[in-house]
Image (tube, grey):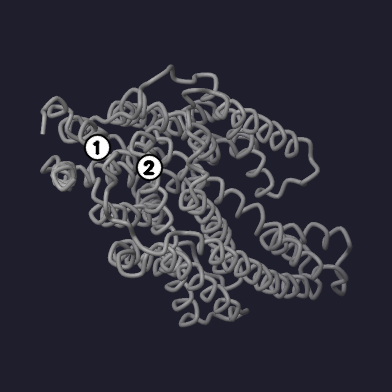
Amino acid sequence: MSGTTTAAAALRRRAAGAGANRWAVLVVLCASLLLVAVDATVLHVAVPAVTEDLRPGAMELLWIVDAYPLVCASLLILFGTLGDRVGRRRVLLLGYTLFGVASAVAALADNAQVLIAARALLGVGGAMIMPATLSILRQVFPDRRERALAIGVWSAVAAVGAAAGPLLGGFLLEHFWWGSVFLVNIPLMLVSLPVGRILLPESKGDSDGPWDVTGALMAAAGLFALVLGVKRLGGGEAAGSPWTVLPLLVGAGLLAAFTRRQRRRTHPLIDLRMFARPAFSTSVGCIVLAMLALVGLELIAAQYLQLVLGLSPLETGLRLLPLTVAAMAAGLAGARMLRRFGPRRMVSAGFCLTAAAVVLLTGMGGRDDWPLLLAGFVLLGFGLETTLFGAYESMLSEAPPEQAGGAAAMGETSYQLGAGIGIALLGSVMNAAYAPGLTGVAGVPVSASSAASHSLGEAYEVADRLGGPAGAALRHAARHSFVHGLHVTLLVSAGLLLAGAAIALRLPRTMQCETPAAEVPAQREAVEPRAAGVKV
């Protein structure tokens, strides 16, 4: 018995130390993630310049912005599971290539249709890159303590990328044309391809049985339709509109059929039995709830800073910067907190801290209270990143190594769905609380009040057209209603976050750092392919 234990321990040490360059591998993976995270937000500041140059129609402009996240979210499961089958490094390097080619096409696009196609191709490349980074990280760091530290660095880089996108885009637009926001990707891809080919190890999952092509396409189509419907809701489309209801129904139907298909197959694309594990299913649910709160709040906070307080886009970005810095700090400290407190207390405390930050931010009013905003954003960033870190780490550690790509894809898909649902849900709450305050404003026609009830920006436009006392009264009422709606939305968000804290109580109490013996051969074969035939 002791001999078996000693041999297993030796294999664990060998797997954990496999590849002296595993920290260099982490650098390459983080560079990949940084590129994808930046590209997700860098276009936002370039939209006015794109509109002026290419003159897209309203629908074309919508697809220019949404093609990337829609395609990326819908293909995560397809490419995550494909990486498990044909090799994660192979899929990642192909993603690099597509990302570079699509960036060049987007930078040189001379009409809206070409730019939409290029953005869709960028989404394909992003869907190849994102789950591959996490699944390779899972294989290169089989020791959970080291993996927790690596995930902390990975998540901190993701926070940096999301914040750096608008700042980088703004800098480039001041000195170059709008295509430069895409062109900057190409040098990074030219470096990442050869470096990744040299440093990244190849790893695969269980290759028994055929890859379920039909199931992969069903999942992609279902997710595309579902995310499209959610985005239309978040964009203010009526909930009863056929162009909203139809995608939601089609998406839900396809995903239900996909689930039944996976349960019946001997070799499923995704082993749905992972969701029977409380740690895995709870972690996925926590990711959805955390993103639901984060994205909706960030969107509303940006509107508050610009439209209520009158800050410029650059000043708004600087006000939100503490949120990113706090998220980076939480990511870097996450491994130590996880070892000390365990997943259950860490994730639950992260939700509670975020809820406290949200309640604190209900003190925001019509005047600029920067100490309050600073404290609230710092607590918000630290709490949410603590939650996301603990959930991602628990999800990856609970998934079998051969299912690493599928698990990473599920985590990223949950992230995208949570973001989309957050914009739709909290946006709807905001509108429901905001609109009633604009009825019956003295001197304002009913038609003007109706137009102003759509958003604060539209209310300001209507007020400017009215002018005089009526315009001033409408502007005042709109600002007051927006702040009221913001408070209601923050309280709803706090309730959702507290629900997340309760759900997180299903996570394990302690961080189990021992690697199960059954995983060791798979890890050794995946991380040390040349030594797979050596007898120990």
Q: Residues within 10 Å of mark 1 (few under 14, many from 20)?
A: many
Instruction: Using the rendered view, name the quadrant where residue 310 is placed.
Output: bottom right
| Farthest-out residue, front | 1
Query: Split into 4 quadrants, where in the image is the C terminus?
Result: top left
In this view of the protein, which residue sits in the foreground, 269 or 533? 533
Which dot marks residue 523?
1
Residue 191 visible in this rendered orientation of the protein: no
Residue 243 visible in this rendered orientation of the protein: yes
In x, y percent, where is residue 12? 19, 45
Residue at image position (38%, 42%) is 36
- For marks 1 and 2, the one nearer the N-term is 2
Residue at image position (48%, 47%) is 277
In x, y percent, where is residue 259? 59, 32
Residue at image position (65%, 70%) is 486
Instruction: Using the rendered view, name the quadrant where residue 187 is placed.
Output: top left
Query: What type is the residue that disc 1 sits on?
Result: Gln
On screen, residue 173 versus residue 250, left or right, reads left
Q: Badge 2 is on which residue? A: 36
